[in-house]
Amino acid sequence: MRHRVVFQGRRLKAIRSQRGWSQRRLARALRIDQSAISLLENGRRSPHNRTLLRLLAALAVPAVYFYD
């Protein structure tokens, strides 16, 4: 049986809040719409590869931080 790897939006929200960043600020840094940040944080969407790479760079965290 395979284990499905799922993006953990609650972790994105937690680290964004710890850094004092608004959804708007993060969205600008990632060059995506603010509504996309909301979808990611609420578990309704997983980031595309390019967005994930930008996210890791902007928040300076390893990819494993966002996945179970």
Image (cartoon, rainbow, N blue to C red):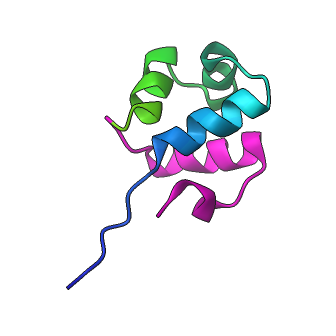
Q: In the rendered image of this protein, does residue 17 appear above or below residue 10?
A: above
Q: Position of residue 20 (x, y in %)?
A: 78, 23
- What number of labels is visible? 0
Q: Is residue 18 above or below residue 25?
A: below
From the image, which quarter does the N terminus lie in?
bottom left
Is 57 covered by the magenta stretch?
A: yes
Which x, y percent locates residue 24? 62, 14
The spot of residue 64 in percent (x, y) is: 59, 64
Q: Which corner quadrant of the image does residue 46 belong to?
A: top left
Residues drawn in magenta: 44-68
How would you classify the magenta stretch by its main secondary structure? helix
User: Seen in the image, is 57 located left or right of residue 37?
Assistant: right
Q: Residue furthest bottom?
A: 1
Report whether 9 appears left or right of 65.
left
In magenta stretch: residue 45:
yes
Picture coordinates of residue 40, whole percent (x, y): 44, 34
| Residue at 52% from the left image edge and 16% from the top image edge | 34
Residue under the image location 30 percent in, 76 percent down: 3
Left or right for 10, reference 59: left
Residue 52 to residue 2: above or below: above
Which residue lies at the image location 40% right of the left edge and 31% below the top edge?
42
- Residue at x 58% of width, y 39% of height: 12
